[in-house]
Image: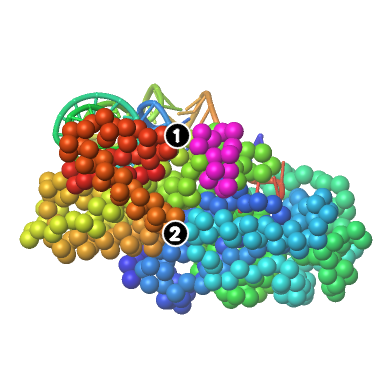
Amino acid sequence: MEKLYIYNTLTRTKQEFKAINAPFVGLYVCGPTVYSDVHLGNCRTFMSFDMIYRYLTHIGYKVRYVRNVTDAGHLESDADVGEDKISKKAKLSQLEPMEIVQKYTVGFRDVMSLFNALPPSIEPTATGHIIEQQEIAKQIIKNGLAYESNGTVYFDVEKFAKDNNYTVLTNRKLEELLENTRELDGQDDKRGRLDFALWIKAKPEHLMKWPSPWGVGFPGWHIECSAMSTKYLGEQFDIHGGGMDLQATHHTNEIAQNIAYCGKSPANYWMHTNMLTVNGQKMSKSLGNSFLPMELFTGQHPLLEKGYSPMAVRFFMMQTHYRSTLDFSNDALNAAEKAYTRLMESYKTLQNLKPSPTSSEKINELEKKCYEAMNDDFNTPVLIAHLFEAIRIINSTNDNKATLTQEDINLLKNMYQHFVFDVMGLKKEEETGKANQALAGVMELIIDLRNKAKANKDYATSDAIRNKLTEVNIQIKDTKEGTNWSI
RNA sequence: GGUCCUGUGGCCGAGCGGCUAGGCAGAGCUCUGCAAAAGCUUGUACAGCGGUUCGAAUCCGCUCGGGACCUCCA
């Protein structure tokens, strides 16, 4: 297996990836909180990890990919005040909390499927692991690093920080954190201002609540990931991922919980994906600048000129490295859409390429470069640059300006299969179905009639056919090899 | 205020000490009854000022922009 380098947030360097128990790899990614529609920024993170999952699998690892669904316990504020997001939405919509959860979980899966993201190996829910979360909280209390106060269980950050590096992920100083954390009302139960809740006492009106050794309540947000990653991947696993906005609080607390629970830091490699921005600002629900995937597909959004296909959007995201911010704009999306189309057109050309006895191009070197790009912290933009070199070669060969042996043609086909389809998860957006087959037959007939008119130099008829087709958004292209059409 | 990231050609976006990134747009050419499309070729760049170095977009310092986190967020 080739050497793969991964940027590790724990060390802030690129490190060679070494699996704990190769060829098996444990990968945990923080999934969505299902209280409303996922927006495009959320999707970016999951598409990045989908690509990472696909590449690890492609190079031979057996990956167990766990991505949770947060369906309880996520409060409006990390300071452990305010309402549970899902309960709040349920009250507003006059629905059961689990109806909200179901609706947005299904919506999330549908969207990810449109983006051709593979389903994770396990998608555990927070509500399905209440017992496990309580067990971890109990053990942390037993280990002296959490305390119960008036029905709520808090993690004692300052005590933990005496013997452990609480801020490994952010490299911040604890004193500075203490100075900069706001004092909030209703927090009298806490001993330290950085302490966070493992279990929260439920008010009578709270909808989602469970019995516990500390009374009726619900789990804190951070502890669900500790519980589920430990349950399915063990106390120590290979990669933990999530968006960069989770790094400072959620992941920091998760590591602290795991160490307090079993003395072990959960993951060897922490990977963080960067944000999708709109006009330079982070796309987020609270800023009100988020795009829903469906708005993007249909073009039904004030900032959009038109709709874009899921694959064009996926390509758009793959053109940027996962650790860079990606700015969202019509121009950028348009550019990506055209590039994606060219990539797919070239694949068609590749299928009909005529082999030569010798090759003028070095395809195996190009393939090697593609692997080098991916092994360098999953550098998909560089991979794409190499693929466009392949496109140039394919088109030149088709124009008889370059030659390829059958072996090289096969190698190119493999490269497409491996990098474009398997790793980046792009696919051809083919029109299938009876109606489209019928249309193809009709178009064949029309083109045949028009070509007869052209052969008779009856350009009036041929142009009339072309103009009429253009009116119904069918475009005619006359090429050397014959006439093509596209919608 | 603190911590950290970032500033690349008209636009998007790689590179992070010496070698063409790539895409889109623009220009030229090829194909063609015309058109469109497509293909090929191609120009323009590293925020500013200092420093280190034989050599800097790439390292260091300062200045000026932009952003993230410290409050819910992928």
Q: Secondary structure at mark 1?
A: helix
Q: Which-is-in-front pick, marks 1 and 2?
A: 2
Quarter where residue A233 is shown:
bottom right
Q: Which residue is mark 2?
A: A433
Question: What residue is shown at x 54% (from left), y 71% (from top)?
Answer: A121
The answer to whether tags 1 and 2 share a subunit is: yes
Location of mark 1 (residue): A331
Q: Chain of mark 2?
A: A
Spot occupied by residue A275 in the image (x, y as percentages of width and height): 55, 46
In the image, A163: left or right of A462? right
Q: Determine whether, in the image, residue B52 is placed left or right of residue A363.
A: right
Q: Is residue A349 magenta?
A: no
Q: How far apart are the alpha carbons under marks 1 and 2?
A: 32 Å
Callouts 1 and 2 close, C-beta under 8 Å? no
Look at label 1 and name its amino acid. Answer: Asp
Q: Nearer the viewer, residue A205 or A444?
A: A444
Density class for disc 1 (Cα within 10 Å; few <14, some 14-19, many ≥20) is few
Residue extent of the magenta highlight: A293-306
Helix, strand or loop status at disc 2: loop
